[in-house]
Image: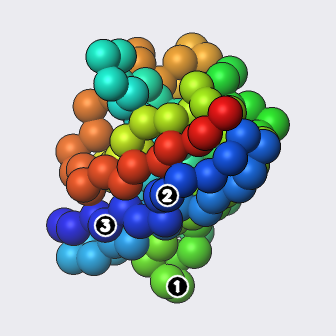
Amino acid sequence: VQLQASGGGLVQTGGSLRLSCAASGFTFANFAIAWFRQAPGKEREGVSCITSNYGNTDSSTFYADSVKDRFTLSRDNAENTAYLQMNSLKPEDTAVYYCAADLLDSLCTTAQAMGNMSVHPWYSHWGHGTQVTVSS
């Protein structure tokens, strides 16, 4: 299982970036995908997650309050890639962003129910991070 995050960069406040999480080595459609971020000196924070399409079911998403209505997580199973569209970026969005994957949809549905990804953050597979810097 390999996950490769990309798309980070330097952007001004109010700008946009699209992060990609390219997957290989597993049946992407069957895995829940999540994005976490970690800023210097801060704990890792769950940003967003999307459930799988296992059994041809529709996926559902969760967003942390800090990014709700600004970030959109989607998945393209044909391309084995998940995308995190980030709009209206703020300096506090500056962090290293990591994508993660797991067979358990419950990691994401628990976040949906509890309103917090930190309740169940133990995704099995992680990619290297991509740096996002938002200048003020």
As rendered, which of 7 and 30 lies closer to the eye? 7
- Picture quarter with the C terminus: top right
Residue type at mark 3: give it.
Gln
Q: Position of residue 31 (x, y in %)?
A: 39, 58
Under mark 2, the amino acid is: Gly
Q: Which is nearer the N-term, disc 2 or disc 3?
A: 3
Residue picked out by circle 3: 4
- Where is residue 89, by image quadrant? top right
Other residues around mark 2 within 10 Å, as few (<14) / some (14–19) / many (≥20): some
Distance from Cα at disc 2 to Cα at disc 3: 15 Å
Query: Looking at the image, which is closer to me, 9 or 113?
Result: 9
Whole-number angstrom distance, CA of label 1 to CA of label 3: 16 Å
Residue under label 2: 9
Where residue 61 sits: x, y (%)? Answer: 64, 43
Q: Is residue 61 above or below residue 118?
A: below
In the rendered structure, are the residues bearing label 2 and label 1 in contact, judged by CB atoms less than 8 Å apart?
no
SS at badge 3? strand
Q: Which mark is residue 61?
A: none
- List the residue tagged with mark 1: 78
How far is disc 2 from disc 1 in space, using C-alphas? 26 Å
Q: Are marks 2 and 3 in contact (CB under 8 Å)?
A: no
Q: Residue at x 21, y 76 (%)?
A: 25
At 33% across and 24% down in the image, what residue appears?
40
Expressed as whole percent of the image width and height from the top left, the position of residue 90 reads 68, 33
**Nearer-N-terminus badge (1/3):** 3
Crowd around label 1: few <14 · some 14–19 · many ≥20 (10 Å): few
Mark in the foreground, 2 or 1: 2
